[in-house]
Image (cartoon, helix red, strand yellow):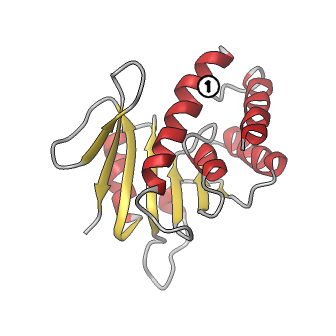
Amino acid sequence: MYAQLSAYLDLLIKWNARTNLTAIREPEEMVQRHFGESLFAGVQVGGRVGQDASLLDFGSGAGFPGLPIQILLPELRVTLAESQGKKASFLREAVRTLGLGTEVWAGRVEAMPEVGGEPRQFDVVTLRAVDNMEQAMLEARRRVNPGGWLVSLTTDSAANDESVRLPGDGVGWVRMQHAD
């Protein structure tokens, strides 16, 4: 696991110099903010779903939180959805380099093919730092299987969610919403 995380960080630093994958440039801050928060969310997810669960990382960007969760929980069936071509190319290269079985959907989540006339659904849908979070949450909720989890890494919690404060700065939360 540590070797994969280290290789992922090296790849992120290399690609980030050419392509704006993340505004954070310092490796130490990348580890804390991107990797740390994603792995913390992965621990929360791992305690709530079975080993063969499916996870959609909605607006994956540079792969957070989906890739660290995949590394932490290799038995999960993870799909990274990213509509920006350069970021999707990075994700494909990261998956290849790290030897993961992760699927990369290079397009908008709304454009994912339907299954049996219904939107493709997942046991867990994660969101972190997506554009237009309110609109993304609406689409994300459609993608959660009944009994599944909508997980957002955010700066606010909600009383009706299973919110867990991120360690460290005390600002961030992992919001866990259970789908009925």
Provide the secondary structure element on which disc 1 rests: helix
- Most foreground residue, 14 or 108: 14
> What kind of residue is marked 1?
Val
Residue furthest to the left in view is 159
| Label 1 crowd bin: few (<14), some (14–19), many (20+), radius 10 Å | some
Q: Position of residue 103 (x, y in %)?
A: 67, 60
Q: In this picture, is 147 found above or below 178?
A: below
Residue at (46% x, 43% y) in the render: 41
Residue 60 is left or right of residue 21, and the answer is left
Q: Is residue 113 left or right of residue 159?
A: right
Question: Height in image: 122 above or below 38?
Answer: below
Query: What is the x, y in percent for residue 33?
Result: 53, 25
Query: Quarter-wise, where is residue 18 in the image?
Result: top right
Residue for point 51% across, 47% down? 42
Q: Is residue 56 above or below residue 114?
A: above
Res. 24 in view? no
Q: Residue furthest top?
A: 26
Name of the residue lying farthest toward the bottom? 116
Where residue 1 appears, as percent x and y from the top left, is 72, 44
Count every numbered label the image shows and give the total.
Answer: 1
Give 162 or 62, whichever is nearer the viewer. Answer: 162
Q: Is residue 30 visible?
A: yes
Residue 25, percent from left and from top: 65, 16
Residue at numbered disc 1: 31
In this rendering, position of residue 127 left or right of residue 82: left
Between 60 and 11, the one nearer to me in the picture: 11
The residue positioned 32% from the left and 39% from the top of the image is 164
Question: In which quadrant of the rendered image does the C terminus lie?
Answer: bottom left
Q: Could you tell me which residue is drawn at 59 percent across and 63 percent down?
A: 76
Q: Quadrant of residue 179?
A: bottom left
